[in-house]
Image (cartoon, rainbow, N blue to C red):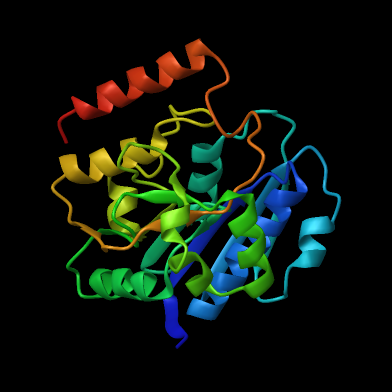
Amino acid sequence: MRKEATDLTIMILIRTDSIARLENVTAVIQHLQRSLNTRICLREADCYCNGILQSALNTCIDYEFIEDDDPILYKTWHFNRMMTHADTPFVAIWDADTIAGSEAIGQCLDQLRKQNADMALPYNGVCLDTSNILRALYLKKQDEEVLMQNIGKMERLSERVMTGGAVMMNRQKFIEIGGENEAYYGWGDDDYDRYIRFMNHGLKIYRTRNVLFHLSHPRGMNSGFNTELHSRISKGQLYKTQNMMP
């Protein structure tokens, strides 16, 4: 059943660097719309607008295109600007390729509303990569049960306990601890940084017992560390956050 969620704004940032990413973000939005009656804000950041993504979306989406000539997608900067347009008590940062169970999303929203959580994640830290075969099956069926029934056929996206991909938060609490940390430029440890800052400030974090699904796609320069220096800078900033007092 579709859950009323007019008190939530879901923010998605995308650079459509492949057809797979275009298909994925469209499928993710459709899944969220089947799960929730909520506001979804999608920002496409690229060097020019070809109109393809916008034409693939329905009119219920708050879509904006931002001209961005930087080959590195500065995620933290973009999300902070997007958040200034969110006027709801709760916000979510959602990856353009992730599917969370509808029931888990609803549980997280309930915990935020009851003030039992300041951050809520609709999964247990395990994110499974669908593989191209199961991704194609999901895109065809548009049914989350296809993913649930094939968990045993998927591999973990990372062996680390993950803290991003689908994150729902009390907007005011997030702003009070600084929002996204813009010291992270491009792909990096910003998800862990955000999670640690919530913990360091004594804020409440809730997780469901479900897994998260990642729709497979070709991985370009914004899907990993580009250089060893990029990695060292990100790890150094995370170390600072881990040792910072609120």
The answer to whether one can see residue 207 in this image is yes
**Which residue corresponds to the image point at 51% horizontal and 47% vertical from the top-left?**
79
Query: In the image, residue 246 lies at what x, y percent?
Result: 16, 36
**Which residue corresponds to the image point at 51% horizontal and 28% vertical from the top-left?**
185
Query: In the image, residue 137 lies at what x, y percent?
Result: 64, 65
Q: Quadrant of residue 183?
A: top left
Which one is nearer the viewer's eye here, 65 or 17?
17
Query: In the image, residue 134 lies at what x, y percent?
Result: 59, 58
Farthest residue, direction front: 153
Residue 239 versus residue 173 in the image, above or below:
above
Q: Is residue 218 left or right of residue 204?
A: right
Q: Is residue 15 left or right of residue 230?
A: right
**Which residue corresponds to the image point at 30% horizontal and 73% vertical from the top-left?**
107
Query: In the image, residue 164 lies at what x, y percent?
Result: 40, 47
Q: Is residue 101 left or right of residue 243?
A: right
Which one is nearer the viewer's eye here, 24 or 76?
24
Farthest residue, direction bottom: 1
Which one is nearer the viewer's eye here, 200 or 223?
223
Residue 94 versus residue 231 in the image, above or below:
below
Q: Quadrant of residue 195?
A: top left
Q: Is residue 22 left or right of residue 210?
A: right
**Which residue corresponds to the image point at 60% horizontal and 48% vertical from the top-left?**
216
Farthest residue, direction right: 50
Count of numbered marks: 0
